[in-house]
Amino acid sequence: MYISLFTSVHTFKDMDDLKTRILKHLPDTAKDIAVSIELIDDLPSSYLYLQQSCCERFYAGDYSECIEKSKPLLDYLWEKLNTGNWKDVSMTWREAYYFVSTLKGSSQAILATDTRAEERNTHSIADAIKTFDMGLLMGAPILNNVLTKLVQDVHTYLEKIGVSDRKTELASRCIDSDKSVHNNANQLLNKKLKTDSEIDQEMEEEIKIQIDKKKK
């Protein structure tokens, strides 16, 4: 169901390979991924209903709708993560945040690099990276730590299409959730969001240029 994380650089034949790589890291069907959801304890039934709908849209290939359905889920989880002291936050909310970030970020990356998708220009690789980073920062790993693998593949893709090393390095400042968050979540988050805001526009412009070149 899952593939191992390789530390070597992967080679993509074309942009469609990023989508293929992303999907290979995830369970094959919505039913399969439901098993992972069930391992997250004590999620409210109303939340689970919307999360399941989000999963179904992802596996139906309706990535735009998956992103839309993920937004209220992440808003809800954000409130749970920011209630009280970080050390007292239930692992349930962190695992759920990680999971929904995986679906949303994967959808953003797929749409941003699909030259045939009408929605491509409304999503960017930078958006996907931020979503993955937030999942790593605020979430707790499930699905065999899939976000680490997805981040690696996105950065390999950026190198493949010719995004400069400096911007790739800046975009890849993901935080290891287990080691870096602990009692300083808000401080780290504010610092990271500031860094992201400084590179987003420049990186997005270059990514669009390089993708357009690949289309010609």
Image (cartoon, rainbow, N blue to C red):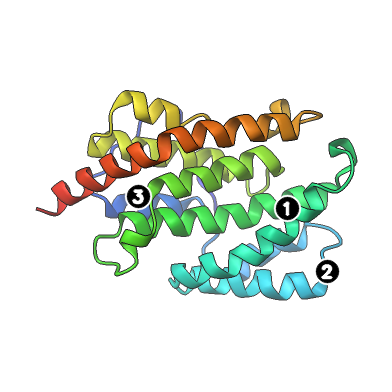
Q: Secondary structure at mark 1?
A: helix
Check the image and name the residue furthest to the left. Answer: 216
Q: Kindly identify which residue carries mark 2.
A: 44
Q: Earlier in the sequence, mark 2 or mark 3?
A: 3
Quadrant including the N terminus: bottom right
Which is nearer the N-term, disc 1 or disc 2?
2
Quarter assignment of residue 116: bottom left
Q: Nearer the viewer, mark 3 or mark 1?
A: 1
Mark 2: amino acid: Pro
- Residue 137 vs residue 170: left or right? right
User: What is the number of the mark on residue 78?
Assistant: 1
Judge whether residue 29 can be spotted in this image. no
Residue located 75% across and 70% down the image: 47
Residue 46 falls left or right of residue 213: right
Looking at the image, which is closer to me, 84 or 69? 84
Query: Identity of the amino acid at label 3?
Result: Leu
Q: Is residue 157 visible?
A: yes
Callout 3: helix, strand or loop? helix
Q: Amino acid at mark 1?
A: Trp
**C-alpha distance separating marks 3 and 1:** 29 Å
Q: Residue at x 67, y 29 (%)?
A: 188
Query: Looking at the picture, how far across and down is residue 77, in whole percent?
Result: 74, 56
Residue for badge 3:
18
1 or 2: mark nearer the eye = 1
